Amino acid sequence: MLVQKSGLSKRTKILLIIFCALMLPAGYFVYSTYFAKPSDTGAALTGEQTVIEQPVVVQPLNEGLLNDAQVGTFTGKSVAGFAEQQSGIYLDETVPLAPEKITVTNPGTGGRLLVAWQLPVQKNFAKVKVYRSEAVGVIGDEVYAVEVRTSDIRMNFSDHSLVNQKIYYYHVVTENAKGAVSQNNEQYPGTPSDTFPPAAPLNVTVINVADSQVKISWIVPLDPDFSAVHIYKSNQRGVLGVLIDPDIQGEKGNGEYALDAVTPNTPYYYTVTSVDASGNESSTDVMAAPYRSNPFEPSL
């Protein structure tokens, strides 16, 4: 008769080993959590309770958030997404917004300066005022005031009757309906000057009056700053020649003339120009032969 051996099978032993391997970590976790003595690190609060101070590790921003792939993608897209944002401003009704981009320009016509400025889009003011001074740090006199319309953006003021080569200082402010003035206090300098030449004399003619003399006549131009006439004389067509009379004080009107001594049977060529009070002279350009652009050849 056969006797069956008692004991565990090979398969059962393997399963038992696996079970023990899984239970050991679980048992250690239960022991360390509920039965192990707390560490002496930290100060005791009450009874057996203690607090453990754990060091706080702060990761540098440039190594953490900014290097994160997802965050980098988000920030990169957000810049483009908000590129068309519109600005806004809280309007204080008691303090008007100041004019912007103020400039003072010399147009070069003499005795005049052009003051220009740009109004803010948000208009919490009713008018614009311009002050002119002849000294730095002094507001001076009010020379211009205008009511502001809703459509006004770029505005300007032409200041006349100024002295050439003299420095003027301008102060531009806004004012609301209650009389409050914008808080800007900058002054902008400008110096008027005359850089434009006057118109040339009209109807210039040259005729013989004797064997050794010619008469030159013209009509004085109507320029308000006309001062004098210059006459140039040459022996060659297309050449300006020499200035024979630098300061003929002609009166406005017709029939102005001058006499010049000449050699009989010799051709002469004359150019007549006008000069203004600032010394600007009308064109002295003379075209060379064969063009007959110089009308100042005397009649023989």
Image: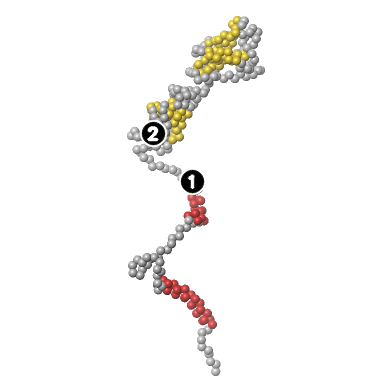
Q: Left or right: 281 with respect to 184? A: right
Quarter in which the C terminus is drawn: top right
Q: Residue at x 49, y 24 (%)?
A: 193
At label 1, the amino acid type is Ala
Q: Is residue 126 in sight in this rendering?
A: no
Q: Residue at x 66, y 17 (%)?
A: 290
- Farthest-out residue, bottom: 1
**Marks 2,1: beta carbons within 8 A:** no
Percent position of residue 247, x then y: 53, 14
Percent position of residue 142, x then y: 38, 27
Q: Is residue 168 in sight in this rendering?
A: yes
Q: Earlier in the sequence, mark 2 or mark 1?
A: 1
- Which of the labelled discs sits on residue 56, or is there none? none
At label 2, the amino acid type is Thr
Q: Secondary structure at mark 1?
A: loop
Q: Is residue 296 above or below residue 186?
A: above
Q: Residue at x 42, y 37 (%)?
A: 120
Nearer-the-camera pick, 254 or 257: 257
Residue wearing tag 1? 83
Q: Secondary structure at mark 2?
A: strand
Q: Left or right: 94 with respect to 242? A: left
Quarter in which the N terminus is drawn: bottom right
- Which of the labelled discs sits on residue 174, or is there none? 2
- Farthest-out residue, top: 210
